[in-house]
Image (spheres, rainbow, N blue to C red):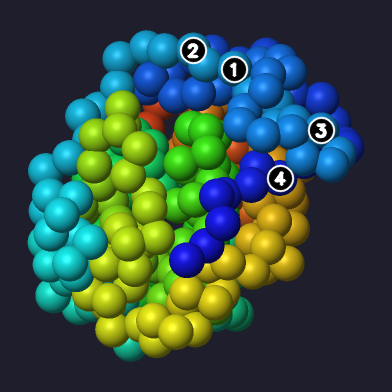
Amino acid sequence: MAEKAKTPPPPKKAPISDAPSRRNLWVILGVAAVVAVIAAGVLIYVSQQSSTPDSGGGASAADVAAGKLKGVKDVNARFTGIPQNADTLGDPAAPVTIAEFADLRCPACRQFALDAMPTVVKDLVKTGKAQYQYRIWPILGPDSVSAAQCGIAAQQQNKLFEYQDLWYINQQDEATTYATPTYCDGVAKALGLDLTKFEKDRQDEALWSPAIQDVQVVAAQQGFGGTPSFIITGPKGEKILSGAIPTAAEIAKTVKAVS
């Protein structure tokens, strides 16, 4: 059983810039104690709230913990045959990279995952027009850090995209604390992951802590105000999408603009 999730130290680079609140997210605005003070300091974040998409709609938390999730067949079919390496999906030679910065517990991220991502994968990733990066950015407190550890553990088995998709389909209420080891193992079990390796990697701070810190640095440099946020990069430059939840058409339009 893993120890209680630690919150990684704050980035030492660019300060967090002011940004508008959205979708009931915990948004980084100043220095606030998150959970436990670790050696270097505390995570920088403060909450701001606005209207947010509802969480839920999938299996109950008990069913998830038992490995009985909704959408497993659809998730496996969506990513079958697409190259996947760590946090990247698609042809590594694709001219454009779509990088999403997301929290597994974020309802707005769930909305994007359910409404837009299947089309993005089908029309842009499978066709080789773009590769897709999923960067886990836990901004909703310590339970999001626990969820991030699990996502990064799935990443070690090249199953991050199936893991995040299945998690979003079965996402629980944002107001609850549910990303327990048993819950995370249930998602992994439903996807057929090696649970022994998954459990070991989930507890390996050397895997998840640097990854989260790196994402914090990028998010601070870009001035992201919440999740999901996107950096879309191609031969003709870079575009940032951070604010309203983008549609698949908006993602496609941006990919075309930088191609």
Residue type at tag 1? Val
| C-alpha gap between disc 2 and disc 1 | 7 Å
* Mark 3 and mark 4: Cα distance apart in space: 9 Å
Residue 100 rendering spot, x and y as whole percentages: 51, 50
Which kind of residue does numbered mark 2 sit on? Gln
From the image, state whether disc 2 or disc 3 is nearer to you.
3
Dot 4, how many residues are within 10 Å of its Cα: few (below 14), some (14-19), or many (20+)?
A: many
Q: Residue 211: which quarter of the image?
A: bottom right
Q: Position of residue 164 (x, y in %)?
A: 37, 59
The answer to whether one can see residue 87 in this image is: no
Distance, label 4 to label 1, CA atoms, is 16 Å
- Residue that mark 3 sits on: 41
Q: CA distance from mark 4 to mark 2?
A: 21 Å
Quadrant of residue 54 within the rendered picture: top left
Nearer the camera: disc 4 or disc 1: 4
Instruction: Indicate the amino acid at tag 4.
Output: Pro
- Write the residue at 53% across / 38% down: 142
Give the residue type that dot 3 points to.
Gly
Q: Secondary structure at mark 1?
A: strand
Residue under pointer 4: 8
Q: Kindly indicate whether the residue at mark 1 contacts the one at mark 2 (C-beta within 8 angstroms).
A: yes
Side (left or right) of 52 relative to 26: left
Residue nearest the viewer, comparing 35 with 30: 35
